[in-house]
Amino acid sequence: MIPRYPSFGPRSLPGLRASSSFSRPVLATRFQARWAATPRAWESTTTGEGKSGHIDAAPNESILWIDNLFPLKLSGLLRAPWKSFDKDLSELMKRFENSTLGVLDPINMVKRAIPKNAQIKVTEILPRLKDGGAFVKFSYPADVPVKDIEAMVSKSLEEAPVKPFFSPFRGVQAGLVNGVPWLEDLHRFPKDRLRVEFVPKNPGEQAVELSQETLYSLFRRYGKIAEITSQSWDSKVLPKFAYVDFTTVRDAIMARNCLHGFVVSEGLGGGKEGTRLRMSYETRVKPHRIWEWMSNHPRIVIPILVALLTGLTVVIFDPIRSFFVKAHVTHKFRLKSSRLYRWLRQQTSDILSFRREKAEQAGLNAVWTHRKDLIDQIQKWLMETAETFIVVQGSRGSGKKELVLEKALKGRSNVLVIDCKPIVEARGESATIKQMASAVGYRPIFSYANSLSSIADLAVQSTTGVKAGFSETLDSQLQKILQTTAGALTEIGIADRSKSDLDASLPVDAYLEAHPEKRPVIVIDNFLHKGNTKTIVYDKLAEWAATLVQSNVAHVIFLTNDSSYSKYLSKALPDRIFRQAALGDLSADVAKRYILNHIGEDEEPQPKATDDDAAETGEKQPQPKIRPDLSELDDCIDTLGGRLTDLEFLARRLKAGQNPKQAVKEITEQSASEILKMFLLPGKSTSDGEHRWSTEQAWYLVRALSANESLRYNEVLLHGAFASSTTAPDGEAALEGLANAELITVKTHRGRPGTVAAGKPVYQAAFALLARDPVLAAKMDLALVTELAKVEAKTIDKAEAELALLGALPKQPAQANGRVQYLLAKLEGAQKKVEGYERDMAGLKKVLSSQS
């Protein structure tokens, strides 16, 4: 026996389960002969006879398609890969003959669909779960036309419709199968569009493409047709085809199962040899008008999308970022700002405090006492409404940041500190944006998104020819971060304003102008760090700071060690005079008091232990710490100078037990080693990004300043190492670069450069130490003299070339005698200098060869 039905077919449905052993007696036995089945009726299969996909019919047999027996949604069960597609359901015909079937049973609906007075015998039922119906094969008398049987069944269903439980509005329909149905079990599921292919009746014959009128007359009886689309006239696709779109999927199923394999005769328009119809379901491509318009107009759509994305970003992320900026400025979520932390620190300050912190604070108190006038001046400026910057300028290690943050701004909670050093030292635009955002508390920040946006922008531009605008430049990204920060600072400034205030009705800028004490304070540290590298950061910060002070949003304090800060700040505020405070080195008296306080606080009084106490405890009493000898401290401070960082370094060495002279000696040697590595050894960097200098120029300054505390600025520029250098011909740029690198300090006189001094006071002693090294001095002097000899050699070459040109004239004019005499004198002077340089080089080479 051939298995006929899948296990998940009709028998798996609630109404198609196999009947139990107990069954009711058949009441109407007169119909049993009429429904008698042949032996093959018990061997039904969903794929036809012998799994061929077709149904064989005898001369007096025909097939009806009964539709709407199963819900189409269950067709997805056929996708289960573990199911078998052919299984015996021989009990199906037994149940068809049973008169006690339920009303909702699909087999009962098949039985009810066929009128009782129809002169037919049902011989086979082939359910099609994915098509939602079943093929019913029947035999009929030879004298009864099959068309009459179809009409009888259709009329019966119209008069007494049979409606399943899942389709209360559409009843069961029946149609006579005119073609050769294809009972496939492929994963092809019904659609409302049919692809009708026109193939020849027999291989080798000619098929005819049917017209839309012919197709309409053939398919309209099975349901309402929405559209018929013929193949394009210039299409070379074979076989020819047409699309027939039905309004419902059920109508398309009915048409396919009834007309698949139907041969259109010549009388119906199928040509002399006839045309066979071959049908398959086709997914209808729904028209996407909006998407087509968007894809066809990228020049309009892409800018709109960018605007929408930008607006969405502003609406969602800007409030979040503004919240985080305000929390960063006010320290709202920091542990140190909580009351519990402050109370614990106050209660445990005596237990957990470190002597080192006490000593450092005591030393700084002496400095703050000395600079109290400067601290009071900065606090006074913060209480005024002047729309300008406050600039605190001083060399590195002079205590600028500590003075401003720990003293001038002590007690303020609305202080924003922006350190330019990590921002300008960041590598790449993404890292720069990330550092800037971190400095102001701007988050969330997607620094990597700029690179991805650049790639997307490039791809869109290469395909459409239009720049999409997804990517943003570093300038625009920094501007966005600073604008969000400005808005957050404005909200912080007016956070304490209440409706009961007398000036509550004033605008924001007028209110902050009237209350300068409520404005936040922005401290921009390390301004112009590393000279002129990444000037865009300094320019954006200066412009942003100018906007804030002009709109009375915040006070801005710049901390810088570069004396050329006015060049950048004047671009942002060209019509304002800056409030300037200069921090120099400490005087000798203050420096000494700083060191003594630093050491004195570290010396805690030790209780005196008696011999009895030592005997009782049996422990060795700690020896009192030996106080260092400070008799040479004054001379050492004169050598070291008043630089705060150097004084702190000296104090720590004194605490370690060194005497002042030994400590200063080690500090001087360390400074000399730093100068040697940074400026004098070959292969080191000789530029700060914009200004370039040479090792010969650096050595000239080291040797000259080792003998003199200062040099005249123009005197240095006129020396051959600067005036005629072949490596760094711009002397003023070289001096500015060396000043930015802190080898020297250029002091001004009435706004112009006046003198050149050592970068730090300890460098004066370091210069002398380097100059006393005979081998180093001989090596560097040899390089300097060689450079000067090259300059004079070029002078000789130029003079000789011009003399040769004058000598080539046919007659020597009298007017050229003066020029000839000048060139000869210049040639003689340069030659004497070269001879002197060569004698010096010989002596220096002798020193290098005789000493190690």
Image (spheres, grey):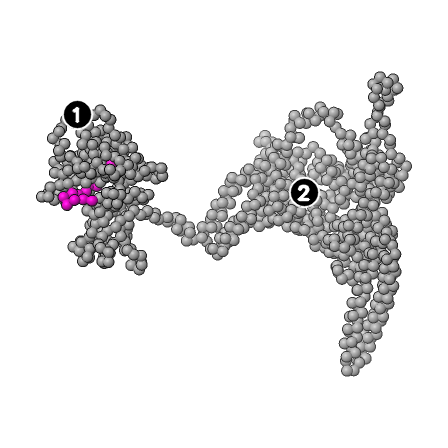
Query: Which corner quadrant holds the N terminus?
Result: top left
Left or right: residue 300 versus residue 757 is left
Q: Regarding mark 2 in the picture, which secondary structure is present there?
A: strand
Q: Quadrant of residue 82?
A: top left
Q: Which mark is residue 25?
A: 1
Residue 292 part of the magenta segment: no
Is residue 595 visible to the viewer in this orientation of the structure? no
Residue to which mark 2 is pinned: 419
At mark 1, the secondary structure is: loop
Q: Indicate the amino acid at tag 1.
A: Pro
> At 48% across and 50% down in the image, what residue appears?
303
* In magenta segment, residue 63: yes
**Cα distance between the residues tagged 1 and 2:** 99 Å
Q: Residue at x 71, y 50 (%)?
A: 531
Residue 165 placement (x, y as % from top left)? 25, 32
The total of numbered circles placed on residues is: 2
In the rendered view, would you say 103 is above or below 693?
above
Residue located at (24% from left, 58% from top): 204
Percent position of residue 171, x then y:
22, 36
Pick the front one: 37 or 754:
37
Question: Residue at point 83% right, 59% down?
Answer: 782
Q: Which residues are magenta?
A: 56-69
Q: Position of residue 248 (x, y in %)?
A: 27, 42
* Mark 1 or mark 2: whose residue is earlier in sequence: 1
Do the residues under discs 1 and 2 have CB atoms within 8 angstroms?
no
Nearer the observer, 767 or 585? 767
| Residue 118 percent coordinates (x, y) | 13, 37
- Name which residue type carries label 2: Asp
Nearer to me, 648 or 852? 852
Q: Mark 2 packing: few (<14 Cα in 10 Å), some, or many (20+)?
A: some
